[in-house]
Amino acid sequence: MIDTSNSPHVKLKNIGIGECQWTEGFWADKFRQCEEIMVPHMGTLLKGDIGHGYNNFKIAAGLKEGKHQGFAWHDGDFFKWMEAAVYIYAVNQDSKIVDELDEIIEVIGKAQEGDGYLHTNIQIDGIAHFSNRKYHEMYNCGHLYTSACVHHRVTGKTNFLDIAIKNADLLYKRFHPQPKELSRFGFNQSQIMGLTELYRTTKDKRYLELAEIFINNRGKSEVVEDSSTEGYPIGDMVQERVPLREETEAVGHAVLALYYYAGAADVYAETGEQALIDALDRLWDNVANQKMYVTGAVGQAHFGASTRRDKIEEGFLDAYLMPNATAYNETCANIANAMFNYRLLGIKGDSKYADIMELVAYNSALVGISADGKHYFYANPLRYNHGQREYQDNRDCTESANREPYIECFCCPPNLVRTIAKISGWAYSLTPNGVTVNLFGGNRLTTKLLDGTEIKLHQDSCFPWDGDIKITIDACKPDPFELLVRIPGWAEHCTLLVNGKESRVETKPGTFAKILRAWHAGDTIELKLPMDVKLMKGHPFIEETRNQTAIKVGPLVYCLESPDLPEGVRTLDVYVPSDILLRKQNDPDVLDGITTLVGNVRVKTDERTSMYGPIGNPEWKSTSVRFVPYYAWSNRGNAEMTVWLPVVWK
């Protein structure tokens, strides 16, 4: 959770951690599960011999014998889990959480070397510091800084922050002189976000200066293999082919790219450099309008090449090249997409960024965790067929048809859990004289406007299952101020009432509806959003979705899963009539009562005896099937699934 309260180039400021709390409905249920199951269960994994994250710090501190386990970036994933725990504490104020974190922080402090260096893989294995970017030292540093800043903001303690400062001072000493041998260093650029947040927390301008150096370093060196780059593809893979301010398209590893862009957005919020935001505008447009799935997911392929023909992994392909069955869509990349858009929402004040935050949250992020909160997806395809990609030899479980209890590359699970823990902080922002409503759901907000006056309000809503949203002012200043309510881009013909009467405020989809008036305790705003079932189509350039449709209700993307098909029918056999009537249905037998869609589809059986064959004259049958939200698939055994389905035109 970033702190832009003093950032000069931000239109919408963040609310404080814990100032918005979910009270009922969808996100309240998810937060409660996060508090009671997700964070504790993940802590058990990471503090035990399965995740081994805490053991690594104990070994580095000399408190335990053993070898480093997990990937080189495992420290950063442990820091993300710590951050999630702090968000939970900000709401429930359970002192046991802080006490446990204090014990952990003490061990981390003992593991830290005298000069500030902290990276257990390198320390335990005796590898030279900052010798090869494949060890993800900058990634671990970035998550250390972010987690420590959040910990300080919520608890007021400096024990974790002191460790982060000591480490950042080392980075400044080593990287600020910009030696040539370190000019291309850094793989996953989370240190840019972390350093900017550390600047915001400490007011030490050196950290902001260093963050900008890391931005400027990319694209200024010849792209050739050397001893510091061996182990991963070079060039576009790590966004070093073109300087950021000149870049025109999102390339390379999707997480690396979007963390890089999010960090640059953080730096812009402090410096206001026009060339920086111009580049980010171009990159946002390229991602959102040419390389993003209908679920808000990004990163089309596990392996491939950029348009400049550099090898890439887990990343962006050409524009409109959107495979479904082989889509990678790493959970971390999808979350990073939301993180980037949250920053642009603050900078620009444009609701289109909140639309993407919402889309990701309900679909391509949430799909990464199971209904029980204990199993995880890393990659998130939009289609899964038995016999096509069975993932039999996938050792680290990054591609699987079933959520896994533990993934060796454990970056995504704690990233998602900390996002669920903090998403209430994205629900509202502060304008110069008011509040924006960014996300919907039953919640309670207690904060201060930028003039220092208190405002209290609460939101009653069963969103996303229902489009009726009611906001009630509980306390506020007597002077006029504005409430800006997001009208989602998908919400055509909505209604906005103030105290039960037409507001006479424009409710254009994809904008904030602005209501400026003198408010009083008890005043209400009622937003009625149309939650009609929509059959979506892809851009004509997307070959993979030609003559196919995806089903969407509000922000929720639905899918067809094989448990909801008659025996012997596969997802590949199903066609959607263009005039299909889908009925909403609350199914208590499906994942504790989510809203599903029921309707009649057309089915034809395909023998699939050869790779190609004549079209023939198929026999069609009509059958009733059930569609479930995409995020909920793979909770009922190993199943086929598809988001896109071929259309039978009336």
Image (tube, grey):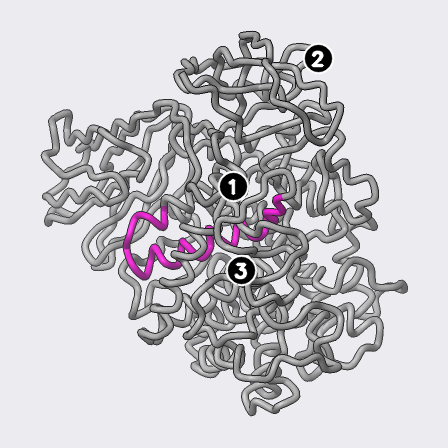
| Camera sees residue 435 | yes
Q: Amino acid at mark 3?
A: His
Question: Where's residue 544, x and y in %?
Answer: 54, 39
> How far is mark 1 from mark 3, CA to CA?
47 Å
Q: Residue at x 72, y 47 (%)?
A: 398
- Quadrant that contains the C terminus: top left
Question: Where's residue 533, x and y in %?
Answer: 39, 23
Q: Amino acid at mark 2?
A: Gly
Residue 151 image label: 3
Residue 341 image label: none
- Nearer the observer: mark 3 or 2; the answer is 2
Residue located farthest toward the right when viewing the structure as drawn: 65
The reply, left or right, for residue 374 in relation to residue 279 is: right
Over which residues does the magenta segment extend?
327-354
| Camera sees residue 160 | no
Q: What residue is disc 2 on?
A: 568
Which of the marked residues, 1 or 3, is nearer the chain's N terminus? 3
> How far is mark 1 from mark 2, CA to CA?
28 Å
Work out whether residue 61 or residue 437 is closer to the camera in this orientation and state it: 437
- Nearer the observer: mark 1 or 3; the answer is 1
Question: Where's residue 206, x and y in %?
Answer: 47, 83
Label 1: which secondary element: helix
